[in-house]
Amino acid sequence: MKSTDGAAAIVKAVTTAQTGARSVIIEALARIEANTGRTKAFTDVLKDRALANADGIDPALKAGKKLPLAGVPFAVANAFDLKGIATRAGSKIGRDGLPAAIDAALIGRLEAAGAICAGAASIDEFGLGHTGETAHDGAVHNPHDLTAIAGGAPAGVAAAIAGGMVPLGLALDSDGGLRIAASLSGLFAIKPTYGRLSRVGVFPTAPSLDHTGVLARSVEDLALAYDAAQGVDAADPAMIKRPLEPVSGRLERGSAGLRIAIADGDFAGAGEARQMMDEIGKRLEVSRRVMIPYAQAALAAAHLIGMAEAASLHAERLRSRAADFDPEVRDRLAAGSLLPAQWIERAQRFRRMFHEQMLALFSTIDVILAPATPMRAPRLGQKSARVGTVEVPVRQSLNSYTAAFSLAGLPVAAVPIAIDGQRLPLGVQAIAAPWREDFALRIARELEKSGLAKAPVARGFAEE
Amino acid sequence: MASKLPDLDQWLDAVAPIVKLDVPAEQRPGVKDHLKTAAKMAALLEKVPLKDETAAAAVYRA
């Protein structure tokens, strides 16, 4: 049993005592040690803690405890609090903070289900970036192609999973980070409805846009972790009181009975993204197209709200420690401090109208499909990329298809699609109405079953 | 409205001191780039008609 196996396979082996939780974690830690140098995936490896937790799993199982994630190693973005470690959130400044007194709530949820946190992984500074090229911890390299970026903001988490070091990860999705990372690193991911999963103990990026979510290499694994992560947390002001709505038992229904449409207009994609959407349409036999209203304005509103919220969050640090920020992040925060209040209020009023319009679309559609990113993973340091016939700036365009759905708080599954002849994958988003994560994940499963979607461990990482 | 971009230097010089932010010369081009993007985005949003009764999405839930 290896960490390159999926979570479900590990759970089966550990619960049937074919292998011990300790041997799973020892193997994962060895892979992390062997591969962090070439990927820069992890910033903190929790060897002692992980081994101690693993030693508790087998006795708990023997005592009859049900552990749906028994022995599964996982990574968290280093914006998640881990007891005893200063939460760096990709920054230099964060390292000077006090060690966290307790773990982030979602880490506790997964560990209560038997999973084992193996370490904290690299992210863009304070989550404010889309490429994982952090100034402080070194750019994260994509395991599928070490000359390419792995990000989204939680690039290290994606690299840890795509590189077979762990099968699961937790990260924050503000304007798309988790889904961008999934698209560029070839993983499945779920960004749930705003208010579904606790964000307590996670350093925010832009609070009204921030969602916690999960990444994995299969839909089954993703659903196992997502189900374990659910539950009300009164300490998160965005949290809505909902009953647990587990999805694991529903996945095999696939697309049966679901009304699916492919996003058109600004979300149609160009070049490879367009071809991918055509191929998905054929495979799922979907011909219906739908226009997302005010697509460009939604991106603008998310951008302005994100700028203002991050500027407010970091105002004091920006005055006192400007030199310790990544220059790109510092300049964006400074600009965010200077925006007229009326612009932000208008963006928030637009947001309500946009949300209402999206809900109206979902009265006749269950799932909307759109590309996750305009392009496959660009090279490290690459400034612009050709998308169809147009040259676009990399950093500013990676969130083009994700930000609007964060703005509306809709649940989205990111699904990795292999492209013929290409080593790097590209992701598609399955977007559903609020609280219908099950619909989004059923489409992800349908695409996985069809063979179009898959998330293998990267070549050169699976074997050794 | 507002298809014409604001004067970015004037904007920066007027507002930065109000929020007690020192923006040294070498940072000005980067900050101005972001201001320019923000102004374009705000102009885009101004064109979307909103009803007077449309409340902001970030409303406190009692």
Image (tube, coloured by chain):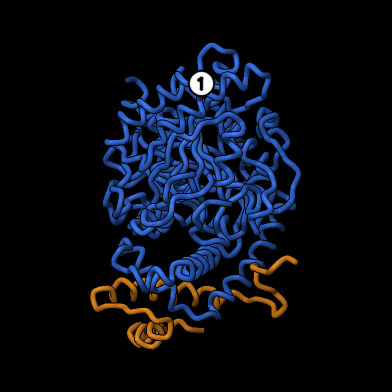
Chain colours: A blue, B orange
Q: Is residue B52 left or right of residue B41?
A: right
- Residue A59, x across and y down, in percent: 59, 19
Q: Is residue B43 left or right of residue A223?
A: left
| Subunit under mark 1 | A
Q: How many C-alpha atoms fall within 10 Å of the one at disc 1: few (<14), some, or many (≥20)?
A: many
* Residue bearing the label numbered 1: A21
Q: Quadrant of residue A32?
A: top left
Residue beneath the point at 48% across and 28% down: A52
Residue beneath the point at 68% across and 43% down: A231
Helix, strand or loop at label 1? It is helix
Q: Is residue A376 visible?
A: no
Q: In the orientation shown, which residue stands out farthest toward the top?
A: A18
Q: Nearer the viewer, residue A105 or A329?
A: A105
* Residue type beneath disc 1: Ala
Q: Is residue B9 visible?
A: yes
- Count of numbered circles in the view: 1
Residue beneath the point at 53% across and 25% down: A71
Residue beneath the point at 61% across and 34% down: A112
- Residue A139, x across and y down, in percent: 30, 47
- Residue A49, x across and y down, in percent: 46, 33
Q: Is residue A310 above or below residue A342?
A: above
Q: Is residue A4 above or below residue A186?
A: above
- Residue A430, x across and y down, in percent: 58, 44
Q: Quadrant of the C terminus of chain A?
A: top left
Q: Is residue B56 left or right of residue A212?
A: right
